[in-house]
Amino acid sequence: MARYTEAVCRLCRREGEKLFLKGQRCYTGKCAIARRSFAPGQHGQGRKKVSEYGTQLREKQKTKRFYGVLEGQFRKTYERAEKMKGKSGENLLQLLELRMDNVVYRMGFASSRAEARQLVTHGHFIVNGNKMDIPSATMKAGDEVAVCESSRQSVKFKELDNRNVPAWLSFDADALKGSIIRLPGREDVDIEVRETLIVELYSK
């Protein structure tokens, strides 16, 4: 399985904003953006005029990196979104929010999406009573996500991140499970993204 293995803080610096890729570290003074808010590399502090294409590309790259999705996966997700009813940009964000790893993160089981992806891959969760170890699996309204019985005694799940769970999800910390109440809407996305620019980029 292909995955990004380089330093993730440089991705935040390249996009010029926090993408919250390292969990709690992003909220401290050690955050790369707090220390060096310019792009990495020799010419990171230089001023450059960004073209229309460049603006669209940066928006796509930012969204892709925020959700921890590689280029091929992102493209396929967009193609799915295009075939759905409604606006392609909003459909894209909805599909990204419904990824298994994102749902696990948003429920508070993990401090970052990368950690959530690892927990899912290692088989710590069941969905509707069946083991799920595919981070990219798309969840749907009514699905219930719970920690496997064999994983419930893990220190990781005894010290859960006290994150506010979004309105489209429910979570029971004592039972170590949660469910998808409804499909997420555009207002439920926790990233400032101009999805219309991504649609324009892929429409060329």
Image (tube, helix red, strand yellow):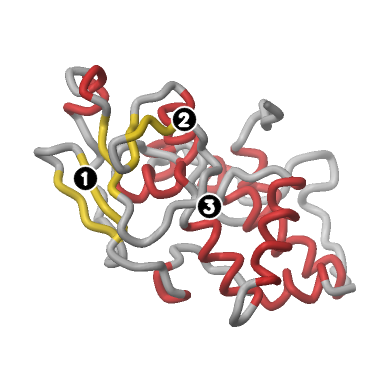
Q: Nearer the viewer, mark 3 or mark 1?
A: 1
User: Which comes before the other along the chain, label 1 or label 2?
Assistant: 2
At horizontal 34% and vertical 40% (from top left) the residue drawn is 127
Distance between mark 1 and mark 2 Cα atoms = 24 Å
Q: Nearer the viewer, mark 1 or mark 2?
A: 2
x and y percentages locating residue 173 in the rendered image: 14, 42
Q: Secondary structure at mark 1?
A: loop
From the image, which quarter does the N terminus lie in? Answer: top right
Q: Secondary structure at mark 3?
A: loop
Residue 36 location, quadrant: top right
Specify the label residue 162 is tagged with.
Answer: 1
Q: The residue under label 2 is which amino acid type? A: Asp
Residue 44 vertical position relative to residue 175 in the rendered view, above or below: below
Q: The residue under label 1 is which amino acid type? A: Asn
- The residue tagged 3 is 18
How crowded is the residue under tag 1: few (<14 C-alpha within 10 Å), some, or many (20+)? few
At horizontal 30% and vertical 48% (from top left) the residue drawn is 107
Residue 109 location, quadrant: top left
Q: Secondary structure at mark 2?
A: loop
